[in-house]
Amino acid sequence: MENIKLTPKRKEIIERMHFHSIIEILRYYPYRYDIYRNESLSMAKHQQKVSIIGVICSNVKIERITKGRMKTSFKINSNDNLVNVIMFNRFTNSKFLFEGARIALIGKYNAFRNELTVSNFKMDVNSQEVKFIPIYSLPSDIKDSTYRSLINYIYQMALEYHLLSNTIPDEFMRKYKLVSFEQAINFIHNPDSDEKLKQAYRYLKYEEFLSFCILGALKRDLYSLSIDQKNKKIDYDIIKNFISTLPFKLTNDQKIVLKEILDDISSNKVMSRLLQGDVGSGKTIVALIALIANYTAHFQGAIMAPTDILARQHYQSIKKFLKDFPNIKITLLVSDMTSKEKNQILKDVANNNVDIVIGTHALIQDSVRYYNLGLAIIDEQHRFGVKQRVALKEKGQQIDVLYMSATPIPRTLASTIYMDMDVSTIENYPYANREIKTFFVNENEITKIEKKIKEYLLTKQKIYVVCPSIEESSLEISNVIEIASQWQKKFIDYHIGVMHGKLTNEEKTSIMAKFINNEIQILVSTTVIEVGINVFDANMIIIYNAERFGLAQIHQLRGRIARDGQVGYCYLLSDSQEVDVQERLEFISQNNNGFKISEYDLKRRGAGDMLGLAQSGKSPFRIANLIDDFNILLVASKDAKYIIANKNKYPKIINNTIKILEESEKYVD
């Protein structure tokens, strides 16, 4: 970009937005459009967002309603209808507003009052005209109009330097009758009709999905080759014997996914499989059976968990399950151990005196040498970075890898997104009637549920209380220190514990042990309890400032309760008046299905880190939406498989994808 002449202002914007190329600037798309058109209000629903064009036909009245808050009101004639108009805090634009002025308005229509509450307006728009104004996500001091001017200038430079060649192969351009990349970029930033905007979306969404799917398919093609010498022979008698010792029966879903995993382990291909299932669906026992199968084939296995608490939880539960199998040696490796303990464990792992090692990031340290690691299980896989996941894979030769996720998405969507791995899904709970009753409560009305809390505590069951903060801060959010103090005063007959990330692992372990052993009845905590905590007589959870948590995170948190078939009670506390917040919390109050919640989240927020598809919070999809555009994704997925199967026909797109794979490590893993 050094050859392009830029004004100081434009150069400053580019630097502040961290753009490094012309294409990067042009690919920063509008997130919405203000569309000014002359719509009829006769068919408009109450509170519907509408756009009308008309002439001001009354005096413009400006009044102060509160300190710093102004109201502007007038009438306009639109399509021979008189409409009342109100604006808030638009008095600085009053010089443009006068009787006889032509104006285009966007706002919410109150059908009962025949009144439009305006969010945006534009002067001097012809009643026959449709005007699209792109709106970008920008720092508050950069105007959209300034940025639009930059975009138009950069677009002309791109044309001059011939930088806008198609990224989609010609064959598919013709097949789907797509506009060119050059046109798509022009239309997305400067649409003058619905049709042109639609054509821009068709090209750009398909392009994003095709690139993403080729990346996944290419990675699978490169890293999942058949291995003649793998030769893992599983002893199914030992597996059947272990399953017979379980205090429960495996569900049909668990049996199906277990067969898929065991077939992978015993095949001559390296396994790369995602095991997804809702919170509490029984993924861990399937993972343990896979580890036992790997052990019977004379290989070591490892489970990597994102937190010390979850690693210890896995260790304790697996140790109990294996009590009748003393020959299977397991160990725990976490950072909070003495040097003497660590050195002994490292020696045992290297000398094949350990069959299953469970731990956190400690498992991928340079000092860890495995004798013959054959199976790596990565729990809560989206919470690890790409390099961490790859580092565990590289601890041995031809390691089978099983990823586990409690953020499930519909099976067809999962299979399409995770093209570099196979997908196994557990949809049903081990107990059919898992019931969690969730209530959305205004935070200042918590006294209304105190009676229910006391009645619940009398049943000798325990409570989780979750806060978004550890200590008091400048933000008006609840913190564990203050809430623990308040609860101790209200519930004087019960012991309260405090858990948060600043405690040492030893302190956390001690507090959890007391909670499990009923020395603590109420645990006030941050989200460190989000995954892996199994306390079967804790069946109530109260979440303060619920608006500060994502839906998937709330679902994970309430997954701590109702884990043994008892009814669970979840209270979401929030005093937010934002419509979006209330809609989200009402939705999760009515839905316990993790698949539906993930789909809802995907539709509203995109993929991002929720699926572990993004680095540093950046979604791989700038413009496409996994749910709304699923049909385009299916087409792109099919085309990507065809391109990979016929690489020689498509050298340009294959080489570009390999470059992405090598340079930016954009793994779909």
Image (tube, grey):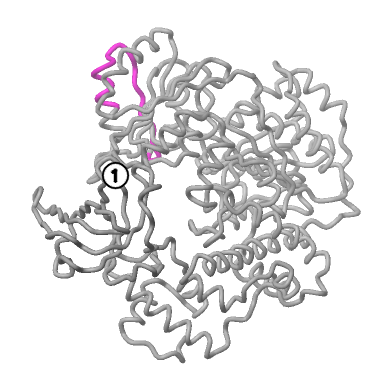
Whether residue 2 sits left or right of residue 250 in the image: it is left
Most extreme residue toward the top is 458
Q: Position of residue 601 (x, y in %)?
A: 50, 44
Q: Is residue 486 magenta?
A: yes
Q: Which residues are magenta?
A: 484-502
Q: Residue at x 46, y 72 (%)?
A: 192
> To which residue does mark 1 refer?
110
Q: Residue at x 75, y 62 (%)?
A: 639
Q: Position of residue 40 (x, y in %)?
A: 38, 54
Q: Position of residue 289 (x, y in %)?
A: 75, 31
Residue 501 sits above or below residue 521 on the image? below
Q: Position of residue 565 (x, y in %)?
A: 58, 16
Near-viewer residue (154 or 5): 154
- Please tell me whether mark 1 sits on a helix, a strand or a loop: strand
Q: Residue at x 36, y 82 (%)?
A: 11
Query: What is the three-letter code of the residue carrying label 1?
Result: Asn
Near-viewer residue (101 or 668): 101
Residue 362 sits above or below residue 162 on the image? above
Q: Residue at x 60, y 56 (%)?
A: 386
Quadrant of residue 348 in the image? top right
Quadrant of residue 90 in the image? bottom left
